[in-house]
Image (tube, helix red, strand yellow):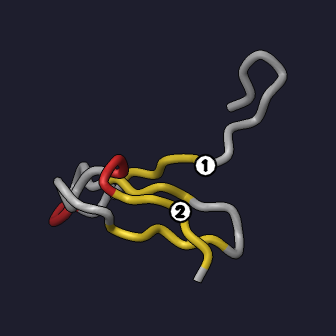
């Protein structure tokens, strides 16, 4: 979603699979990839978009 005329760098997605419901991950802009940086593995805040 664009707010104040500025598009966000990354978006967040949520898992809808019943076995993993509620897990979130950042959707990184290509060619970046979400890299786990610590804390809760189920939370998008625990990932950072990095270039491979």
Which one is in front in this view, the residue at disc 2 or the one at disc 1?
2
Q: Is residue 16 left or right of residue 10?
A: left
Q: Residue at x 77, y 16 (%)?
A: 4
- Residue 36: image location, x then y, percent: 33, 68
**For the residue carrying disc 2, how many other residues have a C-alpha within 10 Å: few (<14), some (14-19), or many (20+)?**
some
Image coords of residue 6 (percent x, y): 79, 28
Depth check, front residue: 21 or 38:
38
Residue plotted at (48% across, 55% down): 26
Furthest toward the top, the residue is 4
Mark 2 highlights which residue? 49
Residues at discs 2 and 1 in contact (Cβ within 8 Å): yes
Crowding at label 1, few (<14), some or many (≥20) Cα neighbours within 10 Å? few
Instruction: Give the number of marks.
Output: 2
Distance of mark 2 from mark 1, alpha carbons? 8 Å
Name of the residue lying farthest toward the bottom: 52
**Label 1, on which residue?**
10
42 to the left or right of 11: left
SS for callout 2 = strand
The residue sitting at 36% across, 51% down in the picture is: 44
Horizontal arrangement in the rendering, residue 27 relative to residue 15 (left or right): right
């Amino acid at each position: 979603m664009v707010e104040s005329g500025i598009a966000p760098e990354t978006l967040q997605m949520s898992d809808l699979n019943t076995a993993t419901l509620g897990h979130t991950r950042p959707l990184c802009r290509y060619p970046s990839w979400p890299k786990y940086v610590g804390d809760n593995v189920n939370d998008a805040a625990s990932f950072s978009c990095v270039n491979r």
